[in-house]
Amino acid sequence: MSFSRYRVTIVAVVEQKTDNNIFGWKYFHIIDPLGIRVNVIDHKTDIFGICKDPYMTMTVKEDGKEPERFKGRPDLNWELKKGGMSGSFKAEFNNAKILGEFNKVPKHTLLNDLIIHKGGKVGNSNWSIDIPFANVSGTLETPQGKRKLSGFLYLDRQWGVVPIQNWVKDWVWTHAANNNLFILSFCINSVDGRNFKYFMQGSKHGVFVNNDLETPYFQDLISSDRLDLEKINAKIGVPGKLSAEFALLPENIMRSRIGESYPNFSASYVRWSVVSGANTFGEPVYGVSEYMRIRKYDNGK
């Protein structure tokens, strides 16, 4: 993707302070169109703010193979070059590591440090897209061997003082890209019945946000009894502007946590590797999609 017509910058990847935050994590993934997805999560806490000990995870999913998963103490380094137009990263585990360089990050400000839930005097929950897209090249080393990576990078953060289990009922999120464009969608159903939608698209024509997002497959995810076993046909669309269809397939699951029990609630979470060949762009886009379901127990049991 070339943004040569536009001023290019990158939002500084500032570590969120956790002294007053109940939860916080940094997430990034690499999409290699040749069939590899890698995501790394740097946890200040777990996603619910229950485990307070920092840790880091990595999942590697190669087409036709079982995912590789790694967990360890945080060992993640980001370096931004002067001007924030490019940089490098390295994440290391006891038996795996990933490192690379990235560039061509498009300028955007509308989804930086976004308050996605206002908790009044208690505080807020925040989401920030630091890198919606970048060209990336790097190296991945795991017990399966050493592999070169070339594709697209995405980075975001979430943090705050209101745990997501206090206000989120369901969410669905997707990021996909190719050499000419990227799309990002995020839809949240809250426990009080409200619905929040966020959509971002970027190409050589610039970056725009449009929250007239339609995700008809969201209801299929909500009503599914076994998210990890079913094929779900998904579609993301902005009426009159674009649409992208893709399948959520059991064989493409990167991570699955079904019906986990926590104090006062249960949670299910699935992340898939996806490819959209049927879309208004006229060319495939490659990405990652995820769904989370949180249900409070009756009477707190």
Image: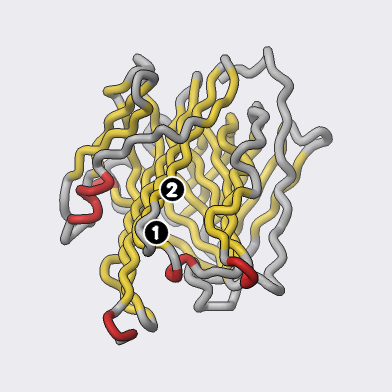
Who is closer to the viewer here, 219 or 102? 219
Could you tell me which secondary element the residue under label 1 belongs to? Answer: strand
Q: Is residue 268 left or right of residue 79?
A: left
Quarter that holds the N terminus = top right
Residues packed near mark 1 inside 10 Å, few (<14), some (14 to 19) or many (20 plus) = some
Query: Residue at label 1?
Result: 190
> Which circle marks residue 27 in the picture?
none
Q: Is residue 280 left or right of residue 111?
A: left
Q: Please, what is the three-letter code of the amino acid marked with disc 2? A: Phe
Do we see residue 69 in this rendering? yes
Q: Is residue 19 left or right of residue 269?
A: right
Q: At x 28% / y 30%, what residue is drawn?
A: 245
In this view, which residue lies farthest toward the right?
Answer: 82
Q: CA distance from mark 2 to mark 1?
A: 8 Å
Tell me whether circle 2 and circle 1 mark residues in contact (CB < 8 Å). yes
Q: Measuring from the top left, give residue 160's x and y in whole percent.
A: 60, 64
Q: Please, what is the three-letter code of the amino acid marked with disc 1? A: Ser
Residue 286 occupies which quadrant of the picture?
top left
Q: Is residue 289 above or below residue 255?
A: above
Q: At x 17% / y 45%, what residue is drawn?
A: 231
Q: At x 37% / y 44%, what residue is drawn?
A: 289
Query: Residue at label 2?
Result: 196
Quarter that holds the C terminus = bottom left
Q: Earlier in the sequence, mark 2 or mark 1?
A: 1
Residue 246 occupies which quadrant of the picture?
top left
